Amino acid sequence: MTSSSSTPGLARFNALEEHAAAAALHEACASAEWGRRLLAGRPYATADDLLAASDAAMAELTEGDLAEAMAGHPPIGRPKPGDPTSSREQRGMAGASEELKAEMLELNLAYQDRFGHVFLICATGLTGEEMRDAVKVRIGNSPEQEREIVRTELGKINRIRLARLVEEQDDD
Protein backbone atom coordinates (compact mmCIF):
# COMPACT_ATOMS: atom_id res chain seq x y z
CA MET A 1 0.00 0.00 0.00
CA THR A 2 1.25 3.46 -0.81
CA SER A 3 0.26 5.45 2.23
CA SER A 4 1.23 8.88 0.94
CA SER A 5 -1.07 8.89 -2.07
CA SER A 6 -4.44 7.58 -3.08
CA THR A 7 -4.60 3.90 -4.02
CA PRO A 8 -7.24 2.00 -6.00
CA GLY A 9 -8.23 0.27 -2.74
CA LEU A 10 -8.69 3.57 -0.95
CA ALA A 11 -10.71 4.91 -3.87
CA ARG A 12 -12.96 1.82 -3.69
CA PHE A 13 -13.39 2.28 0.07
CA ASN A 14 -14.28 5.94 -0.44
CA ALA A 15 -16.85 4.95 -3.09
CA LEU A 16 -18.59 2.23 -1.07
CA GLU A 17 -22.21 2.85 -0.19
CA GLU A 18 -22.49 3.99 3.41
CA HIS A 19 -23.87 0.69 4.74
CA ALA A 20 -21.08 -1.30 3.05
CA ALA A 21 -18.40 1.08 4.31
CA ALA A 22 -19.91 0.93 7.81
CA ALA A 23 -19.82 -2.89 7.71
CA ALA A 24 -16.17 -2.85 6.58
CA LEU A 25 -15.26 -0.45 9.37
CA HIS A 26 -17.15 -2.54 11.93
CA GLU A 27 -14.98 -5.51 10.91
CA ALA A 28 -11.93 -3.39 11.76
CA CYS A 29 -13.30 -2.04 15.06
CA ALA A 30 -16.55 -2.86 16.88
CA SER A 31 -16.98 0.70 18.21
CA ALA A 32 -19.93 2.26 16.41
CA GLU A 33 -18.70 5.76 17.31
CA TRP A 34 -15.26 5.10 15.80
CA GLY A 35 -16.95 3.86 12.63
CA ARG A 36 -19.28 6.87 12.48
CA ARG A 37 -16.35 9.26 12.77
CA LEU A 38 -14.44 7.54 9.98
CA LEU A 39 -17.51 7.44 7.75
CA ALA A 40 -18.05 11.16 8.29
CA GLY A 41 -14.50 11.86 7.07
CA ARG A 42 -14.91 10.21 3.68
CA PRO A 43 -13.61 10.62 1.09
CA TYR A 44 -9.99 10.31 2.22
CA ALA A 45 -7.33 11.70 -0.11
CA THR A 46 -4.65 9.32 1.16
CA ALA A 47 -4.31 6.25 3.33
CA ASP A 48 -2.36 8.45 5.76
CA ASP A 49 -5.47 10.64 6.07
CA LEU A 50 -7.59 7.56 6.85
CA LEU A 51 -5.11 6.40 9.49
CA ALA A 52 -4.93 9.87 11.02
CA ALA A 53 -8.74 9.96 11.20
CA SER A 54 -8.66 6.59 12.94
CA ASP A 55 -6.13 7.87 15.48
CA ALA A 56 -8.20 11.00 16.13
CA ALA A 57 -11.39 8.98 16.54
CA MET A 58 -9.65 6.55 18.91
CA ALA A 59 -8.42 9.42 21.07
CA GLU A 60 -11.99 10.70 21.49
CA LEU A 61 -13.70 7.42 22.38
CA THR A 62 -15.48 7.33 25.72
CA GLU A 63 -15.07 4.50 28.20
CA GLY A 64 -18.28 2.99 26.82
CA ASP A 65 -17.01 3.23 23.26
CA LEU A 66 -13.79 1.50 24.30
CA ALA A 67 -15.79 -1.25 25.99
CA GLU A 68 -17.79 -1.73 22.80
CA ALA A 69 -14.57 -1.94 20.76
CA MET A 70 -13.02 -4.45 23.18
CA ALA A 71 -16.12 -6.64 23.05
CA GLY A 72 -15.24 -7.36 19.43
CA HIS A 73 -11.94 -8.99 20.39
CA PRO A 74 -11.58 -12.61 21.51
CA PRO A 75 -9.24 -13.53 24.37
CA ILE A 76 -5.62 -14.13 23.45
CA GLY A 77 -5.16 -17.81 22.69
CA ARG A 78 -8.80 -18.30 21.76
CA PRO A 79 -9.46 -16.67 18.37
CA LYS A 80 -13.04 -16.67 17.16
CA PRO A 81 -13.75 -19.92 15.27
CA GLY A 82 -13.87 -19.26 11.56
CA ASP A 83 -12.46 -15.73 11.95
CA PRO A 84 -9.31 -15.46 9.84
CA THR A 85 -8.52 -11.98 11.23
CA SER A 86 -8.27 -13.01 14.87
CA SER A 87 -6.47 -16.23 13.90
CA ARG A 88 -3.92 -14.28 11.84
CA GLU A 89 -3.42 -11.65 14.53
CA GLN A 90 -2.95 -14.26 17.24
CA ARG A 91 -0.67 -16.47 15.14
CA GLY A 92 1.97 -16.29 17.88
CA MET A 93 -0.20 -18.50 20.09
CA ALA A 94 -0.94 -21.07 17.37
CA GLY A 95 2.15 -23.18 18.04
CA ALA A 96 2.27 -22.54 21.78
CA SER A 97 2.67 -25.45 24.14
CA GLU A 98 -0.35 -26.71 26.04
CA GLU A 99 1.31 -25.33 29.19
CA LEU A 100 1.57 -21.84 27.71
CA LYS A 101 -2.02 -21.99 26.44
CA ALA A 102 -3.24 -23.02 29.90
CA GLU A 103 -1.17 -20.26 31.52
CA MET A 104 -2.63 -17.69 29.10
CA LEU A 105 -6.15 -18.86 29.89
CA GLU A 106 -5.47 -18.45 33.61
CA LEU A 107 -3.89 -15.01 33.08
CA ASN A 108 -6.73 -13.90 30.78
CA LEU A 109 -9.26 -14.82 33.45
CA ALA A 110 -7.31 -13.03 36.19
CA TYR A 111 -6.97 -9.95 33.99
CA GLN A 112 -10.67 -9.99 33.17
CA ASP A 113 -11.54 -10.32 36.87
CA ARG A 114 -9.32 -7.32 37.67
CA PHE A 115 -10.34 -4.99 34.84
CA GLY A 116 -13.74 -6.28 33.71
CA HIS A 117 -12.73 -6.83 30.08
CA VAL A 118 -10.62 -9.02 27.86
CA PHE A 119 -6.83 -8.53 27.84
CA LEU A 120 -6.19 -6.60 24.66
CA ILE A 121 -2.85 -6.31 22.93
CA CYS A 122 -1.80 -5.76 19.35
CA ALA A 123 -0.71 -9.38 18.98
CA THR A 124 0.50 -9.12 15.38
CA GLY A 125 4.09 -10.31 15.27
CA LEU A 126 4.25 -11.25 18.97
CA THR A 127 5.11 -14.70 20.26
CA GLY A 128 2.97 -16.47 22.81
CA GLU A 129 5.65 -15.83 25.41
CA GLU A 130 5.67 -12.10 24.63
CA MET A 131 1.90 -11.94 25.04
CA ARG A 132 2.10 -13.86 28.32
CA ASP A 133 4.81 -11.56 29.62
CA ALA A 134 2.76 -8.49 28.66
CA VAL A 135 -0.33 -9.63 30.53
CA LYS A 136 1.82 -10.45 33.59
CA VAL A 137 3.16 -6.88 33.60
CA ARG A 138 -0.09 -5.15 32.76
CA ILE A 139 -2.19 -6.94 35.38
CA GLY A 140 -0.38 -4.77 37.94
CA ASN A 141 -1.50 -1.51 36.31
CA SER A 142 -4.15 0.77 37.72
CA PRO A 143 -7.47 0.76 35.85
CA GLU A 144 -6.66 4.26 34.52
CA GLN A 145 -3.24 3.19 33.22
CA GLU A 146 -4.70 0.08 31.65
CA ARG A 147 -7.51 2.00 29.94
CA GLU A 148 -4.96 4.20 28.16
CA ILE A 149 -2.80 1.22 27.22
CA VAL A 150 -5.88 -0.49 25.80
CA ARG A 151 -6.70 2.68 23.82
CA THR A 152 -3.17 2.63 22.36
CA GLU A 153 -3.31 -1.09 21.57
CA LEU A 154 -6.73 -0.71 19.90
CA GLY A 155 -5.31 2.14 17.83
CA LYS A 156 -2.47 -0.09 16.61
CA ILE A 157 -4.89 -2.90 15.76
CA ASN A 158 -7.21 -0.52 13.91
CA ARG A 159 -4.30 0.87 11.85
CA ILE A 160 -3.25 -2.65 10.82
CA ARG A 161 -6.80 -3.62 9.94
CA LEU A 162 -7.48 -0.44 7.97
CA ALA A 163 -4.25 -0.82 6.01
CA ARG A 164 -5.22 -4.41 5.26
CA LEU A 165 -8.74 -3.34 4.22
CA VAL A 166 -7.34 -0.94 1.66
CA GLU A 167 -4.71 -3.45 0.48
CA GLU A 168 -7.28 -6.24 0.12
CA GLN A 169 -9.46 -3.99 -1.96
CA ASP A 170 -6.49 -3.43 -4.28
CA ASP A 171 -6.55 -7.16 -5.06
CA ASP A 172 -10.15 -7.18 -6.36
Image: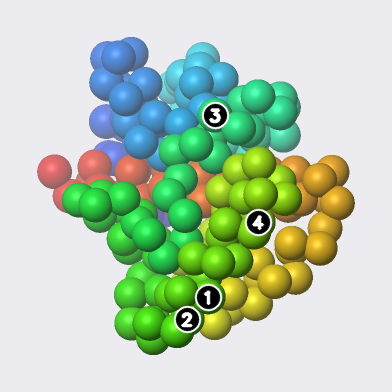
Mark pair 4, 1: CA separation:
12 Å
Mark pair 2, 1: CA separation:
5 Å
Residue 100 is tagged as: 2
Dot placed on the residue nearer the N-terminal end, 1 or 3: 3
Q: Out of 162 and 77, give the one closest to the viewer.
A: 77
Q: Which residue is mark 4?
A: 111
Q: Out of 129 and 59, give the one closest to the viewer.
A: 129
User: x and y percent of residue 97 in the render?
Assistant: 39, 86
Near mark 4 (Cα within 10 A), the count class, few <14, some 14-19 or many ≥20, is many
User: x and y percent of residue 168 in the render?
Assistant: 25, 48
Image quadrant in which you'd find residue 94? bottom left
Assess whether mark 3 and mark 1 are in contact (beta carbons under 8 angstroms): no
Image quadrant in which you'd find residue 137? bottom right
Mark 3 is on which residue type? Glu
Assess whether mark 2 and mark 3 are in contact (beta carbons under 8 angstroms): no
Q: Secondary structure at mark 3?
A: helix
Q: Residue at x 70, y 71 (%)?
A: 136
Q: Secondary structure at mark 4?
A: helix
Dot placed on the residue nearer the N-terminal end, 4 or 2: 2
Q: Out of 18 and 89, give the one closest to the viewer.
A: 89
Near mark 3 (Cα within 10 A), the count class, few <14, some 14-19 or many ≥20, is some
Assess whether mark 2 and mark 4 are in contact (beta carbons under 8 angstroms): no
Dot placed on the residue nearer the N-terminal end, 4 or 1: 1
Mark pair 4, 2: CA separation:
16 Å
Residue 103 is tagged as: 1
Mark 4 is on which residue type? Tyr
- Tag nearer the camera, 3 or 2: 2
Q: Which residue is mark 3?
A: 68
Assess whether mark 1 and mark 2 are in contact (beta carbons under 8 angstroms): yes
Q: Secondary structure at mark 2?
A: helix
Assess whether mark 4 and mark 3 are in contact (beta carbons under 8 angstroms): no
